Image (spheres, rainbow, N blue to C red):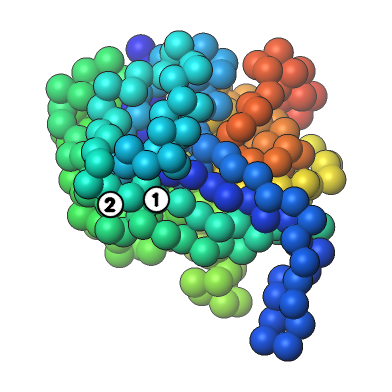
Amino acid sequence: MGVFCYGELGVDNLIRVPHLPSPEVASFPTSETYHVGGAAANTAVWLARWSTPVTLAGNHIGLDPYGENLHLWLEVYPALNLEYVEQSGAVITPFCRVMVTPDGERSFLIFGYPEAPKTRLTKTMLASSDFLALDLYGGDERLDAARVAYEAGIATVVGDVVLADHDILPLTSIATNSAAYIRQVFPGVDIRRHALELQSVSGGVIVTTDGSHPIHVINSDSQEFTVVPPRVVPLDATGAGDAFRAGLMYGLLQSWSLERSVCMGAAAGAFGVQQEGAASKPTRLEEVLVLADSLGAEPMK
């Protein structure tokens, strides 16, 4: 059994800059590289690198150079099932221009994702999956996908579902949210209270990552714990949450405790931010396991 990753797949064009440009001040890039992109594709590649059976689908990609290169990059992984990745000459492959500053932070220019046709998820497609990993960077097809998984009894792991009245929240088994994103949506919010509100609606697990600060987790019994992530010097934070989701689901697929699985997610995320590109060179499983086993969870009172 394995994971079905549904959502964004495209190409990331990483442009390293000494600072972001402004209307009066130009920025001169120091490098430009191309990588697998999109939340679904990034998570799928990390899992496939660890020989976890994973299936990928979402937006269609083109037969243009970006689409051809993306397909070549993905088919390197024997554990990654691409049968539902639809490719057509009528589609322009979605891509992002990602400006990365020396602190590892990134700013995005996004092209083509909203316009690209989406593959509709069916119960048959999920037949060999334990989890559906889902991003919300789309339309009604995301909600439809969550509903299909929920009705089939398959756990859903949804990224950045931060609105308590979002229709997908009651269908969400595990929400993996970014505190930085929550603060942008709700300035001045109390992150812990916000997570408790979400959990009261979903009845599932709420995980809130916060950069180098402790990861806050509420389990399905409303018990809370934290995990302190490893201290690292970030090179590129693109896709850190996607790597975290991969590590979390890998642990749960091994029947590990939620605490140990979150540590696995934290370790994967830490390795992810130390490399260029979200999923171009996922770290070997053995290295991630060593780092994960050095971490621990602390209950909250």
Q: Quadrant of residue 240?
A: top right
User: From the viewer's perspective, is residue 79 above or below residue 217?
Assistant: above
Which amino acid, mark 2? Ala
Give coordinates of residue 104: x percent, y percent. Answer: 75, 54
Is 247 rendered above or below residue 176? above
Dots 2, 1 in contact, CB < 8 A: yes
Kindly identify the residue that appears in the image at 18 percent across and 39 percent down: 120
Q: Look at label 1 and name its amino acid.
A: Pro
Label 1 sits on residue: 94
* Quadrant location of the N terminus in the rendered image: top left
The disc, 2 or 1, on the residue closer to the chain's N-terminal end is 1
Label 2: how many Cα within 10 Å (few below 14, some 14–19, many 20+)? some
Q: Residues within 10 Å of mark 1 (few under 14, many from 20)?
A: many
Residue at (75% x, 71% y) in the render: 27
Q: Is residue 101 above or below residue 53?
A: below
Give the label on residue 19, or none. Answer: none
Q: x%, y% of residue 88?
A: 24, 38
Q: Nearer the viewer, residue 215 or 130?
A: 130
Q: Report the front residue among 135 and 112.
A: 112
Q: Residue at x 44, y 20 (%)?
A: 75
Q: For the residue labelled by badge 1, is the local secondary structure a helix, a strand or a loop?
A: loop
Residue pictured at 61% horizontal, 63% vertical: 107
User: Observer-nearest residue: 156 or 243?
Assistant: 243
Quick check: can you spot residue 10? yes
Task: Measuring from the top left, give residue 59's x and y in whole percent.
Answer: 30, 44
Q: Which residue is mark 2?
A: 116
- Answer above or below: position of 209 versus 259: below
Place of residue 164 in the rendered image (x, y in percent of width and height, measured from the top left):
36, 62
The kind of secondary structure element at disc 2 is loop
Q: Quadrant of residue 205?
A: top left
